[in-house]
């Protein structure tokens, strides 16, 4: 017979230096068997100011520490918001504001996301997103609020000096795809993304 469990929630929502990017820490409940965590709960996220309607879940595996994936975005009308979390390992997660007219255009914020801590980063539409793995065998899962649209798939180069991201490993130690190595610079976007 099921008696029921009282909800002992509450997600913690921390606005970063660019306040539209939010670091979310779900509550975690530990016992002798291990732990339990709700990784997403619509009502709590809405209360925390995140009302995205997610339509697709994605997952990536990176075999080696120092793997860099980014800086990716989809251009309008297929722009995506993302909710990123780490299932195994840890990553240095980054968002760059590309919104036309934004006072923080071209600026970046970051957070370390870990499987053990359960932290998540909400990256709104109009931002480029990327991460660098801090451990081998990192598994990253993220939800998006628009379907993948190859014709709108784009990005900015990870080492753009006009952005100046302070990655946690030297440039020559990072592992990147050929595609990510050839992305354009921020200045090639002109005034930015009009959402």
Image (cartoon, rainbow, N blue to C red):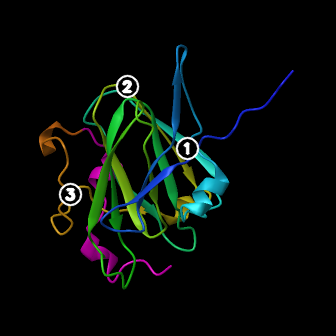
Mark 2 or mark 1, which is nearer the start of the sequence? Answer: 1
Q: Which residues, given as a range, are shown in magenta?
A: 175-195
User: What secondary structure is the stretch in magenta mostly built from?
Assistant: loop
- The answer to whether any part of residue 69 appears in the image is no
Q: Is residue 185 magenta?
A: yes
Q: Is residue 129 above or below residue 62?
A: below
Q: Nearer the viewer, residue 70 or 143?
A: 143
Above-or-below relation of 90 to 193: above
Query: Which label's residue is closer to the chain start, 2 or 3?
Result: 2
| Gap between marks 2 and 3 measured at Cα | 23 Å
- The CA distance from mark 1 to mark 3 is 24 Å
The residue beneath circle 1 is: 58
- Which quadrant of the rendered structure holds the N terminus? top right
Looking at the rendered structure, the secondary structure element under dot 2 is loop
Numbered tag placed on residue 137 in the rendering: 2
Q: Position of residue 183 (x, y in %)?
A: 31, 59
The percent coordinates of residue 195 (x first, y second) are 51, 79
Q: Residues within 10 Å of mark 1 (few under 14, many from 20)?
A: few
Q: Residue at x 17, y 62 (%)?
A: 164
> Quadrant of residue 177 in the image?
top left
């Amino acid at each position: 017979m099921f008696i029921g469990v009282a909800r002992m929630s509450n997600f913690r929502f921390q606005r970063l230096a660019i306040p539209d990017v939010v670091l979310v820490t779900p509550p975690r409940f530990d016992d002798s068997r291990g732990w339990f965590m709700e990784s997403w709960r619509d009502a709590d996220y809405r209360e925390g100011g995140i009302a995205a309607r997610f339509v697709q879940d994605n997952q990536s595996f990176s075999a080696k520490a120092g793997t860099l994936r980014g800086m990716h975005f989809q251009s309008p009308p297929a722009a995506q918001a993302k909710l990123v979390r780490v299932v195994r390992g840890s990553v240095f997660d980054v968002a760059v504001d590309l919104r036309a007219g934004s006072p923080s255009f071209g600026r970046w914020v970051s957070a370390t996301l870990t499987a053990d801590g359960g932290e998540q980063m909400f990256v709104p539409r109009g931002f480029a997103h990327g991460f660098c793995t801090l451990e081998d065998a990192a598994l990253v899962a993220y939800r998006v609020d628009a379907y993948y649209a190859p014709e709108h798939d784009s990005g900015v180069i990870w080492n753009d000096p006009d952005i100046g991201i302070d990655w946690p490993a030297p440039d020559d130690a990072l592992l990147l795809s050929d595609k990510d190595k050839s992305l354009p610079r921020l200045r090639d976007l002109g005034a930015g993304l009009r959402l």
